[in-house]
């Protein structure tokens, strides 16, 4: 499960420095500007290449634990700057990191293993995620990162927005707010060439229409949802904001560690029993984390974080808020997975939910562990043993293998370019 540790994801500082160099080398073509400020006062930097009115917006770093988007954005910016055909009728705009505060807390930029990745893990609570916040918060309570992204979409009115995401362990897939005819075949070809499995039944898109292997189209508003406990309204997210200008959004996912179990389209022999097991394990693991949290002497100190405020004063408070948010999702999801599964549920569908069920308590435990270690809390060693065991079990169960960073970036970049090409054709034909 280890890999060459000289491979690393660039930090936000490194991304901005590289973008600044590109803009300085070709000032007539490239521009780097600040389009907003984070909660903690960090700049939100946009790199633009080209001057055409028709625009593509590429968003990186919306989830701090998914750092592949930054190097992909830079790779694409260099490609567009070097190839005039890509910018003849299109300008390209790269938001280098949508959540620099989150990126400052997720410090796993050179992970040697799944355990190493979780040692420095951070993913903010849903209301603090810039793309997701509008789906769970009223407009007057949005964090500044979300407001800046919405303003940027209003300014550029992109015919295509692409959000660059990644998963820790699994396969690659695409989610679309509206279908892009023709995308599925080159997407599958790229994944095959780079030995990245396609996650054909991701739980992120359970029950959605499928345009091809791993290409999922978001259902129309009001459609029945597979997991009733999840509170968000995806149509209010920043992904749908481009629709008011005739555009659409593609979310491109690529794994850090691949599992060949996630592209098995055979019908599962007993999905009901398998999902019952996942549900029970999820509840049990969440209880273990809750028990440590209840005994931790730091819990009282950080009690304000339970309120979900953005202004909790301690620098580690976001980790505890995120821990609490993840744990609060568990009871509803565990109930959802006790419901009858869809007819013909595949092996990959069950595997994806299995991974989701492992991921949620593991992330909560990993973030809480960082808080407890920083405070010297006596409960930290107990939680450390849980995180270590769960990482090992996750990696072993899914036969995890590292995807070289250059392959992660190349596949994601190809997906963006293909989506831009076919979305433009569809827009011109409309």
Image (tube, rainbow, N blue to C red):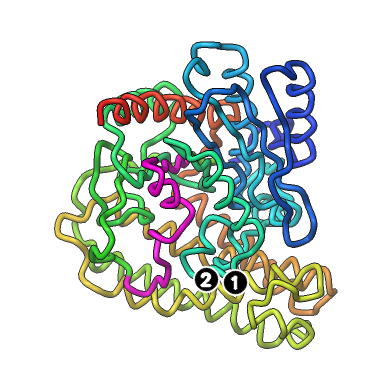
Which mark is on residue 141?
Answer: 1
Who is closer to the viewer here, 297 or 411? 411
Q: Residue furthest left?
A: 343
Query: What residue lies at 62% left-to-right and 46% top-to-bottom?
Result: 61
Which mark is on residue 16?
Answer: none
Q: Quadrant of residue 424?
A: top left
- In the figure, 351 relative to 298: above or below? above
Residue 372 in the image, given as x and y percentages of width and height: 77, 73
Query: What residue lies at 45% left-to-right and 72% top-to-bottom?
Result: 282
Q: Quadrant of residue 310?
A: bottom right
| Lateral position of residue 90 relative to residue 378, left or right | left
Q: Residues within 10 Å of mark 2 (few under 14, many from 20)?
A: some
Residue 112 in the image, given as x and y percentages of width and height: 68, 42
Who is closer to the viewer here, 298 or 99? 99
Q: Is any part of residue 349 visible from this angle? A: yes
Who is closer to the viewer here, 56 or 387? 56
Residue receiving disc 2: 137
Q: Is residue 236 magenta?
A: yes
State which region is magenta.
228-253
Residue 425 in the image, given as x and y percentages of width and height: 32, 24
Label 1: which secondary element: helix
């Amino acid at each position: 499960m280890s890999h060459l540790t000289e491979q690393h994801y660039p930090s936000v500082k490194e991304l901005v420095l590289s973008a600044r160099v590109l803009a300085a080398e070709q000032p007539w073509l490239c521009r780097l500007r600040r389009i907003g400020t984070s909660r903690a006062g960090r700049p939100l930097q946009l790199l633009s290449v080209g001057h055409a009115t028709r625009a593509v917006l590429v968003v990186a770093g919306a989830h701090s634990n998914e750092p592949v988007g930054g190097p992909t954005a830079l790779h694409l910016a260099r490609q567009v700057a070097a190839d005039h055909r890509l910018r003849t009728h299109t300008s390209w705009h790269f938001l280098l990191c949508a959540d620099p505060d989150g990126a400052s807390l997720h410090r796993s930029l050179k992970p040697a293993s799944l355990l190493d990745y979780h040692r420095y893990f951070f993913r903010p609570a849903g209301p603090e995620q810039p793309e997701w916040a509008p789906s769970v918060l009223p407009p007057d309570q949005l964090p500044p990162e979300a407001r800046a992204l919405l303003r940027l979409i209003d300014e550029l009115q992109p015919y295509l927005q692409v959000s660059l995401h990644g998963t820790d362990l699994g396969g690659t897939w695409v989610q679309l707010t509206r279908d892009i005819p023709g995308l599925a075949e080159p997407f599958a070809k790229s994944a095959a060439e780079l030995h990245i499995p396609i996650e054909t039944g991701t739980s992120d898109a359970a029950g959605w229409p499928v345009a091809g292997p791993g290409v999922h189209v978001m259902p129309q508003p009001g459609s029945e949802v597979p997991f009733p406990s999840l509170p968000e309204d995806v149509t209010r997210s920043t992904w749908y904001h481009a629709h008011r200008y005739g555009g659409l959004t593609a979310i491109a996912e690529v794994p850090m560690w691949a599992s060949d179990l996630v592209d098995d389209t055979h019908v599962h022999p007993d999905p009901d029993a398998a999902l019952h097991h996942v549900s029970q394990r999820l509840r049990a693991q969440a209880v273990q984390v809750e028990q440590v949290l209840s005994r931790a002497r730091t819990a009282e100190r950080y009690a304000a974080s339970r309120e979900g405020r953005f202004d909790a004063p301690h620098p580690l408070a976001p980790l505890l808020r995120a821990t609490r948010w993840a744990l609060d999702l568990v009871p509803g999801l565990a109930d959802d997975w006790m419901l009858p599964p869809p007819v013909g549920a595949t092996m990959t569908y069950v595997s994806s939910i299995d991974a989701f069920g492992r991921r949620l308590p593991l992330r909560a435990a990993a973030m809480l562990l960082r808080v407890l270690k920083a405070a010297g809390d006596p409960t930290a060693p107990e939680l450390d043993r849980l995180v270590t065991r769960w990482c090992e079990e996750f990696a072993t169960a899914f036969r995890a293998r590292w995807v070289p960073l250059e392959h992660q970036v190349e596949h994601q970049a190809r997906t963006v370019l293909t989506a831009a090409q076919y979305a433009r054709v569809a827009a011109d034909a409309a």
